[in-house]
Amino acid sequence: MASTMLAQAIVEFFKHKVVSSIIILACWPPSDQIKFTRELSQFGMSSMFSCDPAVLDHIRHHYLQGVIYMTHEHDDMPMFKKIYPLTLETATPVHIYDAYVHPRDGISINLWAHWTNASGLVLTHERERILRRLDLKKYPLRIATPVGHYSSDKYDGTFVDFLEDESISDQDPGIRSGYGTSMLLTEVVNAQVGFTYLSERESSSNMYLEPFSPGVWWSCLAMMAILALVERVTSKTPMEKDGAFYTVLTTWLQQEKLKFCLQVETTWDDLEYLKKKKKTSKFYQELKRGVELIRQGSTAFHSEYNQIYPHFKTFSDEQICKLQHVDTIPEWTEVLRTAGGWLLETGLGKRLVARLRIPQPPCRASLLAERVKLGDIASLLALTIFGAFLSVVLLGVEILVAKAKNSNLPEGDSKVDNVDDIPDSVEHSNYIE
Protein backbone atom coordinates (compact mmCIF):
# COMPACT_ATOMS: atom_id res chain seq x y z
CA MET A 1 0.00 0.00 0.00
CA ALA A 2 2.91 2.35 0.68
CA SER A 3 4.21 1.91 -2.88
CA THR A 4 0.73 2.57 -4.25
CA MET A 5 0.45 5.82 -2.31
CA LEU A 6 3.91 6.93 -3.45
CA ALA A 7 3.18 6.06 -7.07
CA GLN A 8 -0.15 7.89 -6.98
CA ALA A 9 1.46 10.99 -5.44
CA ILE A 10 4.22 10.98 -8.07
CA VAL A 11 1.73 10.61 -10.92
CA GLU A 12 -0.47 13.48 -9.71
CA PHE A 13 2.59 15.70 -9.25
CA PHE A 14 3.93 15.13 -12.76
CA LYS A 15 0.48 15.38 -14.34
CA HIS A 16 0.23 18.81 -12.73
CA LYS A 17 3.47 19.63 -14.56
CA VAL A 18 1.99 18.28 -17.84
CA VAL A 19 4.42 15.36 -18.00
CA SER A 20 3.41 12.05 -19.54
CA SER A 21 6.57 9.99 -18.91
CA ILE A 22 9.30 9.98 -16.26
CA ILE A 23 12.85 8.70 -15.90
CA ILE A 24 13.71 7.15 -12.52
CA LEU A 25 17.37 7.26 -11.51
CA ALA A 26 17.70 4.49 -8.93
CA CYS A 27 19.86 1.39 -8.52
CA TRP A 28 17.03 -0.89 -7.43
CA PRO A 29 16.72 -4.65 -7.82
CA PRO A 30 14.88 -5.73 -10.99
CA SER A 31 11.93 -7.04 -8.98
CA ASP A 32 11.42 -3.68 -7.25
CA GLN A 33 11.73 -1.84 -10.55
CA ILE A 34 9.01 -4.03 -12.08
CA LYS A 35 6.71 -3.53 -9.09
CA PHE A 36 7.09 0.24 -9.06
CA THR A 37 6.74 0.54 -12.83
CA ARG A 38 3.51 -1.47 -12.61
CA GLU A 39 2.22 0.84 -9.88
CA LEU A 40 2.90 3.93 -12.02
CA SER A 41 1.30 2.42 -15.12
CA GLN A 42 -1.91 1.76 -13.19
CA PHE A 43 -2.36 5.53 -12.87
CA GLY A 44 -1.53 6.29 -16.52
CA MET A 45 2.16 7.19 -16.26
CA SER A 46 4.89 5.54 -18.34
CA SER A 47 8.35 5.26 -16.78
CA MET A 48 11.82 3.82 -17.23
CA PHE A 49 14.58 2.95 -14.75
CA SER A 50 18.27 3.64 -15.10
CA CYS A 51 21.22 3.40 -12.74
CA ASP A 52 23.42 5.53 -15.01
CA PRO A 53 22.75 9.31 -15.13
CA ALA A 54 24.27 9.36 -18.63
CA VAL A 55 20.84 8.32 -19.92
CA LEU A 56 19.79 11.96 -19.58
CA ASP A 57 22.10 12.85 -22.47
CA HIS A 58 19.96 10.77 -24.83
CA ILE A 59 16.49 12.01 -23.89
CA ARG A 60 14.17 13.44 -26.54
CA HIS A 61 14.28 17.19 -26.11
CA HIS A 62 11.02 17.83 -27.97
CA TYR A 63 9.14 15.83 -25.31
CA LEU A 64 8.48 17.01 -21.76
CA GLN A 65 9.77 14.30 -19.41
CA GLY A 66 10.16 14.18 -15.65
CA VAL A 67 13.16 12.89 -13.69
CA ILE A 68 13.11 11.23 -10.23
CA TYR A 69 16.31 10.55 -8.31
CA MET A 70 16.04 8.00 -5.46
CA THR A 71 18.64 6.59 -3.08
CA HIS A 72 18.32 3.46 -0.98
CA GLU A 73 20.78 1.25 0.82
CA HIS A 74 19.14 -2.15 1.21
CA ASP A 75 18.04 -4.62 -1.42
CA ASP A 76 14.83 -5.46 0.42
CA MET A 77 12.86 -2.21 0.23
CA PRO A 78 10.47 -1.68 3.13
CA MET A 79 8.17 0.46 1.01
CA PHE A 80 6.86 -2.68 -0.70
CA LYS A 81 5.99 -4.38 2.57
CA LYS A 82 2.52 -4.06 4.11
CA ILE A 83 3.74 -3.01 7.56
CA TYR A 84 1.46 0.00 8.08
CA PRO A 85 -2.26 -0.06 8.82
CA LEU A 86 -4.47 1.02 5.94
CA THR A 87 -6.10 3.90 7.85
CA LEU A 88 -2.74 5.30 8.90
CA GLU A 89 -1.40 5.22 5.35
CA THR A 90 -4.50 6.93 3.99
CA ALA A 91 -4.26 9.83 6.42
CA THR A 92 -0.47 10.29 6.20
CA PRO A 93 0.32 13.23 3.86
CA VAL A 94 3.19 13.24 1.40
CA HIS A 95 4.95 16.63 1.51
CA ILE A 96 6.44 18.06 -1.68
CA TYR A 97 9.19 20.71 -1.47
CA ASP A 98 10.44 23.25 -3.99
CA ALA A 99 14.20 23.40 -4.51
CA TYR A 100 15.33 26.81 -5.80
CA VAL A 101 18.92 27.62 -6.73
CA HIS A 102 19.82 31.31 -6.67
CA PRO A 103 22.95 32.29 -8.68
CA ARG A 104 24.44 34.10 -5.66
CA ASP A 105 22.68 32.83 -2.50
CA GLY A 106 22.69 29.14 -3.40
CA ILE A 107 20.00 26.52 -2.88
CA SER A 108 16.91 26.85 -0.68
CA ILE A 109 14.28 24.22 0.17
CA ASN A 110 10.71 25.43 0.73
CA LEU A 111 7.41 23.64 1.24
CA TRP A 112 5.28 23.76 -1.89
CA ALA A 113 2.41 21.21 -1.66
CA HIS A 114 1.20 18.06 0.02
CA TRP A 115 -0.69 14.99 -1.13
CA THR A 116 -3.07 12.63 0.62
CA ASN A 117 -5.15 9.78 -0.67
CA ALA A 118 -8.32 11.59 0.31
CA SER A 119 -7.62 15.15 -0.88
CA GLY A 120 -5.14 14.49 -3.67
CA LEU A 121 -2.51 17.07 -4.61
CA VAL A 122 -3.01 20.39 -2.78
CA LEU A 123 -0.83 23.41 -3.68
CA THR A 124 -0.34 25.26 -0.41
CA HIS A 125 2.52 27.62 -1.33
CA GLU A 126 2.17 28.13 -5.10
CA ARG A 127 2.03 31.92 -4.85
CA GLU A 128 5.15 32.04 -2.67
CA ARG A 129 7.00 29.82 -5.14
CA ILE A 130 6.18 32.14 -8.06
CA LEU A 131 7.23 35.29 -6.16
CA ARG A 132 10.44 33.62 -4.97
CA ARG A 133 11.48 32.75 -8.51
CA LEU A 134 10.63 36.21 -9.80
CA ASP A 135 12.75 37.93 -7.14
CA LEU A 136 16.38 37.79 -8.27
CA LYS A 137 17.40 40.02 -5.31
CA LYS A 138 19.05 42.57 -7.61
CA TYR A 139 21.35 39.99 -9.12
CA PRO A 140 22.57 41.23 -12.55
CA LEU A 141 21.96 38.99 -15.53
CA ARG A 142 24.35 39.02 -18.47
CA ILE A 143 23.26 37.71 -21.82
CA ALA A 144 24.75 37.91 -25.32
CA THR A 145 22.54 39.93 -27.65
CA PRO A 146 23.23 41.97 -30.81
CA VAL A 147 23.14 45.73 -30.37
CA GLY A 148 22.04 47.89 -33.27
CA HIS A 149 24.42 50.63 -34.41
CA TYR A 150 21.93 52.23 -36.80
CA SER A 151 21.09 55.88 -36.33
CA SER A 152 19.57 58.33 -38.80
CA ASP A 153 22.21 60.86 -37.69
CA LYS A 154 25.10 58.56 -38.61
CA TYR A 155 23.71 56.73 -41.64
CA ASP A 156 22.04 58.38 -44.62
CA GLY A 157 19.24 55.94 -45.35
CA THR A 158 16.58 53.74 -43.83
CA PHE A 159 17.21 50.85 -41.48
CA VAL A 160 16.59 48.37 -44.33
CA ASP A 161 19.21 50.15 -46.44
CA PHE A 162 21.58 49.93 -43.48
CA LEU A 163 21.08 46.16 -43.23
CA GLU A 164 21.53 45.64 -46.99
CA ASP A 165 24.67 47.81 -47.19
CA GLU A 166 27.54 45.35 -47.76
CA SER A 167 30.23 48.01 -47.29
CA ILE A 168 29.64 47.99 -43.51
CA SER A 169 28.92 44.30 -43.06
CA ASP A 170 31.10 44.23 -39.94
CA GLN A 171 28.44 46.18 -38.01
CA ASP A 172 25.53 44.32 -36.44
CA PRO A 173 26.26 40.89 -37.96
CA GLY A 174 23.62 39.24 -35.76
CA ILE A 175 20.82 41.53 -36.91
CA ARG A 176 21.94 41.23 -40.53
CA SER A 177 21.88 37.45 -40.28
CA GLY A 178 18.40 37.47 -38.76
CA TYR A 179 17.13 39.90 -41.37
CA GLY A 180 18.55 37.87 -44.24
CA THR A 181 17.06 34.66 -42.86
CA SER A 182 13.62 36.19 -42.38
CA MET A 183 13.63 37.64 -45.88
CA LEU A 184 14.71 34.28 -47.23
CA LEU A 185 11.77 32.58 -45.57
CA THR A 186 9.41 35.35 -46.64
CA GLU A 187 10.06 34.46 -50.27
CA VAL A 188 9.15 30.82 -49.67
CA VAL A 189 6.46 30.97 -46.99
CA ASN A 190 4.61 33.77 -48.74
CA ALA A 191 0.92 34.48 -48.47
CA GLN A 192 -0.88 32.81 -51.38
CA VAL A 193 -3.69 35.00 -52.64
CA GLY A 194 -6.21 34.63 -55.42
CA PHE A 195 -9.85 34.76 -56.48
CA THR A 196 -12.32 32.21 -55.10
CA TYR A 197 -15.71 31.56 -56.67
CA LEU A 198 -18.34 28.86 -57.15
CA SER A 199 -18.56 26.94 -60.41
CA GLU A 200 -20.35 23.82 -61.54
CA ARG A 201 -18.33 20.70 -60.83
CA GLU A 202 -17.43 18.38 -63.67
CA SER A 203 -19.54 15.23 -63.59
CA SER A 204 -20.19 12.14 -65.68
CA SER A 205 -23.79 13.20 -66.29
CA ASN A 206 -24.33 15.11 -69.53
CA MET A 207 -20.71 14.36 -70.43
CA TYR A 208 -21.30 14.25 -74.20
CA LEU A 209 -23.13 17.58 -74.33
CA GLU A 210 -20.60 19.67 -72.42
CA PRO A 211 -19.33 22.34 -72.62
CA PHE A 212 -22.37 23.67 -74.54
CA SER A 213 -25.98 23.81 -73.46
CA PRO A 214 -28.72 21.95 -75.37
CA GLY A 215 -29.80 25.22 -76.99
CA VAL A 216 -26.36 25.63 -78.58
CA TRP A 217 -26.44 22.11 -79.98
CA TRP A 218 -29.93 22.59 -81.44
CA SER A 219 -28.79 25.88 -82.98
CA CYS A 220 -25.79 24.16 -84.58
CA LEU A 221 -28.04 21.41 -85.96
CA ALA A 222 -30.51 23.93 -87.36
CA MET A 223 -27.70 25.95 -88.93
CA MET A 224 -26.25 22.85 -90.56
CA ALA A 225 -29.68 21.89 -91.94
CA ILE A 226 -30.19 25.37 -93.40
CA LEU A 227 -26.74 25.41 -94.97
CA ALA A 228 -27.24 21.93 -96.43
CA LEU A 229 -30.59 22.98 -97.90
CA VAL A 230 -29.07 26.12 -99.42
CA GLU A 231 -26.16 24.11 -100.80
CA ARG A 232 -28.57 21.62 -102.40
CA VAL A 233 -30.78 24.31 -103.93
CA THR A 234 -27.87 26.26 -105.37
CA SER A 235 -25.99 23.22 -106.66
CA LYS A 236 -25.67 22.88 -110.44
CA THR A 237 -24.80 19.20 -110.86
CA PRO A 238 -26.33 16.03 -109.37
CA MET A 239 -23.04 15.25 -107.66
CA GLU A 240 -23.14 18.57 -105.79
CA LYS A 241 -26.73 17.87 -104.72
CA ASP A 242 -25.86 14.42 -103.38
CA GLY A 243 -22.91 15.74 -101.36
CA ALA A 244 -24.55 18.91 -100.07
CA PHE A 245 -24.92 17.71 -96.48
CA TYR A 246 -21.44 16.21 -96.23
CA THR A 247 -19.90 19.32 -97.77
CA VAL A 248 -21.51 21.52 -95.14
CA LEU A 249 -20.57 19.09 -92.35
CA THR A 250 -16.93 18.92 -93.44
CA THR A 251 -16.67 22.67 -93.82
CA TRP A 252 -18.30 23.18 -90.42
CA LEU A 253 -15.90 20.88 -88.62
CA GLN A 254 -12.80 22.37 -90.24
CA GLN A 255 -13.51 25.94 -89.17
CA GLU A 256 -11.09 27.50 -86.68
CA LYS A 257 -12.23 29.48 -83.69
CA LEU A 258 -10.00 32.37 -84.75
CA LYS A 259 -12.32 32.97 -87.68
CA PHE A 260 -15.10 33.91 -85.30
CA CYS A 261 -13.14 35.71 -82.55
CA LEU A 262 -10.29 37.83 -83.85
CA GLN A 263 -11.95 39.22 -86.95
CA VAL A 264 -14.94 40.67 -85.10
CA GLU A 265 -14.65 44.43 -84.63
CA THR A 266 -16.35 45.80 -81.49
CA THR A 267 -17.85 49.28 -81.19
CA TRP A 268 -19.03 48.98 -77.57
CA ASP A 269 -16.62 51.04 -75.45
CA ASP A 270 -17.86 49.76 -72.09
CA LEU A 271 -16.46 46.26 -72.36
CA GLU A 272 -15.15 44.98 -69.04
CA TYR A 273 -11.70 44.03 -70.35
CA LEU A 274 -11.24 47.25 -72.35
CA LYS A 275 -12.07 49.73 -69.62
CA LYS A 276 -10.53 50.03 -66.17
CA LYS A 277 -13.24 50.97 -63.71
CA LYS A 278 -12.66 53.12 -60.68
CA LYS A 279 -12.56 51.52 -57.25
CA THR A 280 -15.70 52.39 -55.34
CA SER A 281 -16.20 52.48 -51.59
CA LYS A 282 -17.60 48.93 -51.74
CA PHE A 283 -14.53 47.56 -53.52
CA TYR A 284 -13.03 46.26 -50.25
CA GLN A 285 -15.35 44.05 -48.21
CA GLU A 286 -15.07 42.19 -44.92
CA LEU A 287 -14.07 38.55 -45.09
CA LYS A 288 -17.47 37.36 -43.87
CA ARG A 289 -19.20 39.47 -46.49
CA GLY A 290 -16.91 38.04 -49.16
CA VAL A 291 -17.77 34.50 -48.08
CA GLU A 292 -21.46 35.31 -48.42
CA LEU A 293 -20.87 36.71 -51.90
CA ILE A 294 -19.07 33.51 -52.86
CA ARG A 295 -21.96 31.47 -51.43
CA GLN A 296 -24.40 33.37 -53.67
CA GLY A 297 -22.39 32.20 -56.68
CA SER A 298 -22.13 35.54 -58.50
CA THR A 299 -18.80 36.91 -57.19
CA ALA A 300 -15.13 35.93 -57.29
CA PHE A 301 -13.66 37.21 -54.00
CA HIS A 302 -9.96 38.07 -53.76
CA SER A 303 -8.36 37.11 -50.44
CA GLU A 304 -5.58 35.14 -48.82
CA TYR A 305 -6.34 31.42 -48.85
CA ASN A 306 -5.12 30.77 -45.33
CA GLN A 307 -7.67 33.26 -43.97
CA ILE A 308 -10.67 32.28 -46.06
CA TYR A 309 -10.41 28.47 -45.87
CA PRO A 310 -11.71 28.21 -42.26
CA HIS A 311 -14.90 30.03 -43.32
CA PHE A 312 -15.66 27.32 -45.87
CA LYS A 313 -16.56 24.95 -43.03
CA THR A 314 -20.05 26.48 -43.15
CA PHE A 315 -20.46 25.47 -46.81
CA SER A 316 -22.28 22.34 -47.84
CA ASP A 317 -20.37 19.52 -49.48
CA GLU A 318 -21.88 20.42 -52.84
CA GLN A 319 -20.68 24.01 -52.52
CA ILE A 320 -17.18 22.91 -51.45
CA CYS A 321 -16.94 20.71 -54.54
CA LYS A 322 -17.83 23.72 -56.71
CA LEU A 323 -15.08 25.97 -55.33
CA GLN A 324 -12.65 27.20 -57.96
CA HIS A 325 -9.52 29.34 -57.55
CA VAL A 326 -7.56 31.74 -59.73
CA ASP A 327 -4.11 32.38 -58.24
CA THR A 328 -2.69 35.89 -58.43
CA ILE A 329 0.88 37.08 -58.08
CA PRO A 330 1.99 37.61 -54.43
CA GLU A 331 3.24 40.98 -53.31
CA TRP A 332 6.86 40.23 -52.41
CA THR A 333 8.11 38.33 -55.44
CA GLU A 334 11.28 40.35 -55.95
CA VAL A 335 12.90 39.33 -52.65
CA LEU A 336 15.75 36.85 -52.86
CA ARG A 337 14.56 34.91 -55.90
CA THR A 338 17.72 32.82 -56.12
CA ALA A 339 17.69 31.77 -52.47
CA GLY A 340 13.96 31.14 -52.57
CA GLY A 341 14.41 28.88 -55.58
CA TRP A 342 17.06 26.93 -53.69
CA LEU A 343 14.67 26.41 -50.79
CA LEU A 344 11.99 25.13 -53.15
CA GLU A 345 14.41 22.76 -54.89
CA THR A 346 15.58 21.23 -51.61
CA GLY A 347 11.99 20.75 -50.38
CA LEU A 348 12.32 23.01 -47.33
CA GLY A 349 9.81 25.49 -48.69
CA LYS A 350 7.22 22.81 -49.34
CA ARG A 351 7.70 21.45 -45.82
CA LEU A 352 7.21 24.86 -44.21
CA VAL A 353 4.16 25.64 -46.32
CA ALA A 354 2.59 22.27 -45.50
CA ARG A 355 3.10 22.85 -41.77
CA LEU A 356 1.82 26.43 -41.67
CA ARG A 357 -0.94 26.62 -44.25
CA ILE A 358 -4.47 25.62 -43.34
CA PRO A 359 -5.81 23.13 -45.91
CA GLN A 360 -9.06 23.63 -47.76
CA PRO A 361 -11.96 21.46 -46.51
CA PRO A 362 -11.96 18.25 -48.58
CA CYS A 363 -14.58 17.51 -51.22
CA ARG A 364 -16.02 14.22 -50.03
CA ALA A 365 -17.78 13.58 -53.33
CA SER A 366 -14.47 13.48 -55.20
CA LEU A 367 -13.16 10.76 -52.85
CA LEU A 368 -15.93 8.38 -53.92
CA ALA A 369 -15.95 6.44 -57.16
CA GLU A 370 -18.64 8.01 -59.32
CA ARG A 371 -20.51 5.47 -61.37
CA VAL A 372 -21.50 6.14 -64.96
CA LYS A 373 -25.14 5.08 -65.16
CA LEU A 374 -27.02 4.00 -68.24
CA GLY A 375 -29.01 7.22 -68.14
CA ASP A 376 -25.81 9.26 -68.46
CA ILE A 377 -25.02 7.76 -71.86
CA ALA A 378 -28.61 7.16 -72.95
CA SER A 379 -28.45 10.01 -75.45
CA LEU A 380 -25.33 8.54 -77.09
CA LEU A 381 -26.83 5.05 -77.29
CA ALA A 382 -30.09 6.39 -78.71
CA LEU A 383 -28.21 8.43 -81.29
CA THR A 384 -26.14 5.39 -82.31
CA ILE A 385 -29.21 3.16 -82.71
CA PHE A 386 -31.04 5.89 -84.59
CA GLY A 387 -28.07 6.34 -86.93
CA ALA A 388 -27.89 2.61 -87.65
CA PHE A 389 -31.63 2.45 -88.37
CA LEU A 390 -31.47 5.59 -90.50
CA SER A 391 -28.59 4.16 -92.57
CA VAL A 392 -30.67 1.07 -93.41
CA VAL A 393 -33.64 3.23 -94.36
CA LEU A 394 -31.48 5.46 -96.56
CA LEU A 395 -29.99 2.40 -98.24
CA GLY A 396 -33.47 1.13 -99.09
CA VAL A 397 -34.51 4.54 -100.36
CA GLU A 398 -31.45 4.71 -102.61
CA ILE A 399 -32.23 1.27 -104.07
CA LEU A 400 -35.84 2.22 -104.77
CA VAL A 401 -34.82 5.52 -106.34
CA ALA A 402 -32.29 3.77 -108.58
CA LYS A 403 -34.89 1.24 -109.77
CA ALA A 404 -37.38 4.00 -110.40
CA LYS A 405 -34.86 5.90 -112.52
CA ASN A 406 -34.08 2.78 -114.59
CA SER A 407 -37.75 2.07 -115.21
CA ASN A 408 -38.38 5.61 -116.46
CA LEU A 409 -35.58 5.52 -119.08
CA PRO A 410 -36.46 4.92 -122.80
CA GLU A 411 -36.03 1.40 -124.16
CA GLY A 412 -33.09 2.30 -126.33
CA ASP A 413 -31.26 3.99 -123.42
CA SER A 414 -31.62 1.08 -121.03
CA LYS A 415 -28.44 -0.24 -119.60
CA VAL A 416 -27.14 -3.71 -120.37
CA ASP A 417 -26.78 -5.43 -117.07
CA ASN A 418 -25.46 -8.75 -118.43
CA VAL A 419 -22.90 -9.38 -121.12
CA ASP A 420 -24.84 -12.49 -122.25
CA ASP A 421 -27.73 -10.25 -123.37
CA ILE A 422 -25.63 -8.81 -126.28
CA PRO A 423 -26.95 -10.15 -129.67
CA ASP A 424 -24.93 -12.77 -131.52
CA SER A 425 -24.82 -10.61 -134.63
CA VAL A 426 -22.26 -8.43 -132.96
CA GLU A 427 -19.87 -11.33 -132.73
CA HIS A 428 -20.10 -12.02 -136.50
CA SER A 429 -19.87 -8.43 -137.63
CA ASN A 430 -17.10 -7.70 -140.09
CA TYR A 431 -14.76 -4.79 -140.01
CA ILE A 432 -14.69 -2.95 -143.34
CA GLU A 433 -12.05 -0.38 -144.04
Image (cartoon, grey):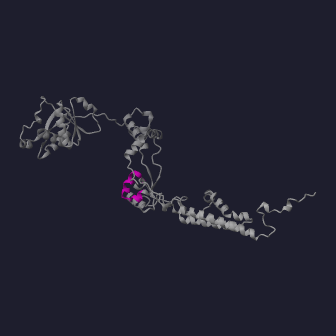
Residue sitting at x 72%, y 63%: 239
Q: In the displayed orientation, state which residue is furthest to the right.
A: 433
Q: Is residue 346 left or right of residue 225?
A: left
Report the front residue among 148 and 53. Answer: 53
Whether residue 141 is in magenta: the answer is no
Q: Is residue 264 left or right of residue 332?
A: right
Q: How many marks?
A: 0
Residue sitting at x 68%, y 64%: 244
Question: In what quadrant of the picture does the N terminus appear?
Answer: top left
Q: Is residue 93 visible?
A: yes
Which stretch is magenta? 303-320
At which x and y percent is residue 421? Answer: 79, 63
Report the front residue among 171 and 119. Answer: 119
Q: Is residue 377 left or right of residue 135?
A: right
At which x and y percent is residue 94? Answer: 11, 40
Report the front residue among 359 and 299. Answer: 359
Q: Which picture quadrant has residue 140?
A: top left
At which x and y percent is residue 40? Answer: 18, 40
Depicted 357 relative to depicted 179: above or below: below
